[in-house]
Image (cartoon, helix red, strand yellow):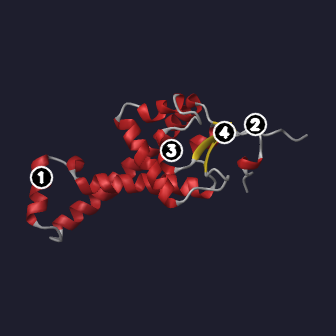
Amino acid sequence: MTDHPATCELYTPAPLWRRLAAMLYDSLLCIALAFVVTAIYTALHKLLISAGLFSDRYGAMLEAEGNVGHDPVLALVLVVSLWLFFGFFWRRAGQTLGMQTWRIRIENPDGSVISWTQALLRVIAGLLSWATFGLGWLWQWWDPQDRSWTDRLSRSRTMQLAKRKKHD
């Protein structure tokens, strides 16, 4: 399993550049996830409309928009998909694939993995950070404990892991 960073002096708050590098890596995975989820949603949506399971008014509304890109249900499905994606990784080992590459970990102050509620709060704070052009992550520069909005809102922390020693 993973080491408990809270018990090791070599772990420090992750610097912003590492967080951004991991986000760039993970954003590629999230874009792929969004494409797959949108394709499945669109296919199911068209199937349900053609089967007459949605009201004509809802179908007409989407037709007037020209696509399902303005569908609030799709937006909610995508946010839930992101929550499940990040929550799965953060609940399992505290790291997404990008975070593993850049040796950072999300954890509670005692070193334990975060809860599903904390994962949801991190996703919401992340969306707010994007909406404010990165202010939520830049906040780390002014916070005395190097916490971003995602860390503060979820009462968790993002730590840099020490390099693993190679065994002979």
User: Neighbour class for label 3 at 10 Å: few (<14), some, many (≥20)?
Assistant: some
Indicate which disc residue 103 carries.
4
Q: State how far apart marks 1 and 3 are (Cα).
A: 42 Å
Asked which quadrant contains residue 125, the reply is top left
Cβ atoms under marks 4 and 2 closer than 8 Å: yes
Please determine whether, in this image, residue 56 is positioned above or below residue 33.
below
Residue 153 position, x and y percent, is 47, 47
Type of amino acid at the residue the image marks with label 4: Arg
Marks 1, 4: nearer the viewer: 4
Residue ID at (31%, 55%): 76
Please determine whether, in this image, residue 55 is positioned above or below residue 39.
below
Please determine whether, in this image, residue 118 is positioned above or below residue 165.
below
Q: Is residue 25 left or right of residue 47?
A: right
Marks 3, 4: nearer the viewer: 3
51 or 70, which lies in front? Answer: 70
Residue 119 position, x and y percent, is 49, 54
Residue identified by numbered label 3: 152
129 or 44, which lies in front? Answer: 129
Type of amino acid at the residue the image marks with label 3: Arg
Q: State how far apart marks 2 and 3 are (Cα).
A: 26 Å
Residue identified by numbered label 2: 163
User: Which circle's residue, 3 or 4, is located before the other in the chain?
Assistant: 4
Residue identified by numbered label 1: 63
Cβ atoms under marks 2 and 3 closer than 8 Å: no
| Quadrant that contains the C terminus | top right
Residue 28 position, x and y percent, is 47, 39
User: Which circle's residue, 2 or 3, is located before the other in the chain?
Assistant: 3
8 or 35, which lies in front? Answer: 8
Cβ atoms under marks 1 and 4 closer than 8 Å: no
Type of amino acid at the residue the image marks with label 2: Lys
**Does the image show residue 31?**
no
